[in-house]
Amino acid sequence: MDKQSQLLGTLDSLYASVLEDGAWGEGLTRLARLVGGSGAFIMKADPRTTTVVGTEAYDVDREAIDVFMGHYSSKDIRIPAALTRPV
């Protein structure tokens, strides 16, 4: 599949995610692949406590996420800095 077709398919999936629950994961996975990645990982953080409260993972090893959440998430310097910015 050429890059333009990949991009259009990715955009279709992301737009579809507004109406279809299952399309969000497909859209993120397609986006990761479009830019050369193998999967997508989203962290949700509480701005009051600057702690990670949840994750979403698509084509990412669950064990790696568990290790990250168990040890590294509390040390991730990007979280407090990111939470000072509006969405």
Image (spheres, rainbow, N blue to C red):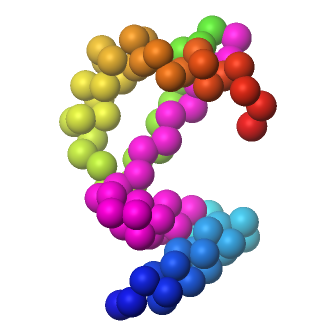
From the top left corner, tell me how far across and down residue 65 is, in percent: 31, 34
Q: How many marks?
A: 0
Q: Is residue 59 left or right of residue 4?
A: left
From the top left corner, tell me how far across and down residue 41 is, in percent: 42, 44
Instruction: Tell me if I can see residue 85 in this picture.
Output: yes
Foreground: 7 or 12? Answer: 7
Which part of the image, by quadrant, shows the N terminus?
bottom left
Per the rendered image, the range of residues in magenta is 24-48
From the top left corner, tell me how far across and down residue 82 is, in percent: 62, 25
Q: Residue shown at 56%/83% (left/top)?
A: 8
Residue 26, above or below 62: below
- Residue 43 part of the magenta segment: yes
Q: Residue shown at 47%/16% (left/top)?
A: 77
Residue 22, above or below 72: below
Q: Residue shown at 49%/61% (left/top)?
A: 28
From the top left corner, tell me how far across and down residue 21 is, in percent: 62, 64
Residue 52, above or below 32: above
| Residue found at the far right of this picture | 86
Q: Residue shown at 66%/74% (left/top)?
A: 16
Which part of the image, by quadrant, shows the C terminus?
top right
Instruction: Tell me if I can see residue 22 in this picture.
Output: no
- Residue 76 part of the magenta segment: no
Foreground: 23 or 72? Answer: 72
Q: Quadrant of residue 84?
A: top right
